[in-house]
Amino acid sequence: KAGVTQTPRYLIKTRGQQVTLSCSPISGHRSVSWYQQTPGQGLQFLFEYFSETQRNKGNFPGRFSGRQFSNSRSEMNVSTLELGDSALYLCASSLAPRTSGGLGNEQFFGPGTRLTVL
Amino acid sequence: DQQVKQNSPSLSVQEGRISILNCDYTNSMFDYFLWYKKYPAEGPTFLISISSIKDKNEDGRFTVFLNKSAKHLSLHIVPSQPGDSAVYFCAASWGLGNNDMRFGAGTRLTVKP
């Protein structure tokens, strides 16, 4: 079974531009979460989508947005890029959000998109 | 707001010995904990998890211990192998229907042959 794929793998943009990153979850997985990884802040949760609806959102400005399509593929968009947005953006998929006490649906991560803002 | 902390940025152990990676958390609402392993240029890979109703979960060479009163969990790798060298992240989440995970900063484990 193919894993989570993310495109592009590397991206260079300049301040003020916008960027769209894409994530294709594992076949059958309907939940997609996005994370930002930076050396200083570690892995931080951006948002989660399930059945084309945003279920949870982390503490990021409105410049960060996302969406999910009917085939569970997801995109995240960052507008008006800032230097501090340079990071590794990771997408993770799971079958569904946690549904039973004590049990979780493990999230499987893609390789990430390395975004550099100049 | 660092709710999950891994205070040791790095750990070095000899092959065959035990590796113990530690993680502390502050949010008592967390009820599900996970460990991920990350190699360079790859996304994190799920290793093992534990729910708050247990205090130990074992999977082969990997055992996770949870001490809820101390808000502390640890990952034991026995015996350690050179292929275990990677960055290990501790993560925590809470609530049903919630895939929002809070991660620690990671611990880089080096297993020397």
Image (tube, rainbow, N blue to C red):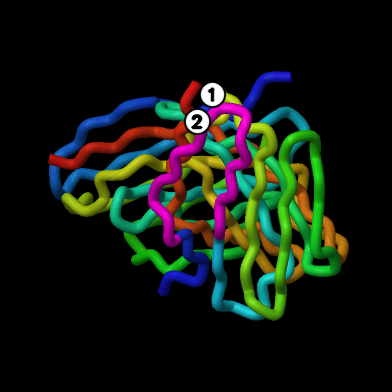
Residue plotted at (50% across, 37% down): B13
Residue plotted at (68% across, 47% down): A31
Q: Are marks 1 and 2 in contact (CB under 8 Å)?
A: yes
- Tell me the residue that label 2 is attached to: B111
- SS for dot 2: strand
Amino acid on which the number 1 mark rests in the picture? Pro
Q: Neighbour class for label 1 at 10 Å: few (<14), some, many (≥20)?
A: some
Q: Chain of mark 1?
A: B
- Tell me the residue that label 1 is attached to: B82
Mark 1 or mark 2, earlier in chain: 1
- SS for dot 1: helix
Residue A63 percent coordinates (x, y): 32, 59
Q: Neighbour class for label 2 at 10 Å: few (<14), some, many (≥20)?
A: many
- Quadrant of the rendered image containing residue B73: bottom right
Question: Is B75 displayed left or right of B54 in the figure?
Answer: left
Residue A81 percent coordinates (x, y): 22, 50
Which quarter of the rendering shows the C terminus of chain A?
Answer: top left
Amino acid on which the number 2 mark rests in the picture? Val
Q: In whole angstroms, how far apart are the C-alphas of marks 1 and 2?
A: 5 Å
Residue A92 percent coordinates (x, y): 59, 42
Q: Are marks 1 and 2 on the same chain?
A: yes
Residue A74 percent coordinates (x, y): 55, 40
Magenta range = B7-22
